[in-house]
Image (cartoon, rainbow, N blue to C red):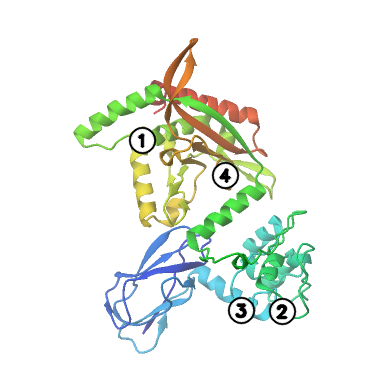
Amino acid sequence: MYEFKLPDLGEGIHEGEILQWHVQENDDIAEDDSLVDVETDKAAVTIPSPKGGKVASLTGDVGDTINVGQVIAVIDDGTEAAVAEPPSEVAAAAAPEDELTAATAPSSPLVPRDGVRRPVPAAPATRRLARELGVDINMVTATGPAGRVTPDDVRAAAEGRRLPAVVEPPPSVAKPEVGVVSAETAFAAHAASAIPFLDIDPLPDFEQWGPVDKEPLRSIRRRVAHRMTTSTVLVPHVAHMDDADVTLLEEFRANANASADKEGGDRLTLLAFVVKAVTAGLKAAPVFNSSLDPFNEEIVYKKYYNVGIAVDTGRGLIVPVVRNTDCKSIRQIAADIKDVAGRAREGKIDVAELQGSTFTITNVGPLGGTALIPTINYPEVAILGMGSVRPKPVVRDGEIVIRTILPLTMAFDHRVADGADAARFVAELARQLSDPNLLLVEA
């Protein structure tokens, strides 16, 4: 018998949701045949079987969440005793973490005793310490006020010690009757922020006003919620807006695509031109190709150009990355966008292709709308939003003429850049998009 454990699916991923089993118990399976589809908070992946034989047992039903290192299938490969696959580094770290959780969990109803991770308040430095020590901060026993995790809590968890828990609800949470703690109150106490005046109150019972449906916040949707909350809470957003006259560019694209249709080549999208123009802008304004390290109080300037493309997949927002855009032609960029966006929507993109972006572009133009204010893809410092391309009356040389206009909005981190920097960046971007010759020279 061979015990197959859920392998390490990528950096920072500890669990996955079962989407589909490709086999049933007692089925025969060959090595490398598809075993199960699992969706993590970054992408959906198909996991092949590491062994051939007969499926003896499967763990979990569709919709269940399984942890890295957990046995998901037992395969009868002809051996007598069950042989477990060597755990990955993540699984090995998870095992002692589970033991620490069981050893340190107090009797407080605010501390999870069912092995389920719940949000906890903690300062950024405390979270960094937890990462360095390999401790899941959401499973640490909190002894700080309002359920806050302290650095000592993290160190105690790493060393296997237990500190006396002092857990009390924040002022905004009504104290329940003795011995009675509702799930909403427990969650609010755990989610109470260390930021002054920012407490999370329990939700009302919506069913008192009418029927409701409930859907678990899982996988990619949960990851989006986490990233957007992190970005909007930590980053002071400022948005700069401008219009780009893309009349000549759209005429150029139409001619190029007509030739591509005859010759069977890939069509050029407006987004590909924007990616190229953005890359040129990042070279001239490197602050927008950086990240802020608040722990070391320094700005990290990246000398490479990887542009993330926000893709609506129906399961949540995914941002695949087009790499080395400074070294690629517009046609190559267009082909890469088509490839990664297509595989992202099909759930077939690799997790590694969702990492390492230095700047992100989101294009809601095809869906309509005049403009948007996007949220920065943390830990980047800027994001560009593209609105809907439309013919509009504008004034040129004292006359009203109809031109094709692309609305642009750049949201940026005001800690590292000022409004004047953004204004210059977007103005240069609009200038390049107004003249295809400028883009071709850059390409």
Q: Which residue is mark 3?
A: 99
Q: Which residue is mark 4?
A: 375
Q: Secondary structure at mark 2?
A: loop
Which residue occupies the extreme front position in the image? Answer: 209
Q: Residue at x 43, y 47 (%)?
A: 311
Q: Secondary structure at mark 3?
A: helix
**Horizontal side, residue 43 vs residue 209: left or right:** left
How far apart, in angstroms, are the residues tagged by discs 1 and 4?
23 Å
Number of residues whose C-alpha sits closer than 10 Å to that of mark 3, classed few (under 14), some (14–19) or many (20 or more): few
**Lower position in the chain sequence, tag 1 or tag 2:** 2
**Lower position in the chain sequence, tag 3 or tag 4:** 3
Residue 37: percent from left, percent from top: 38, 67
Inspect this view and state whether residue 329 appears: no
Q: Which residue is mark 2?
A: 106
Tell which tag, 1 or 2, sits nearer the viewer. Answer: 1
Tell which tag, 1 or 3, sits nearer the viewer. Answer: 1
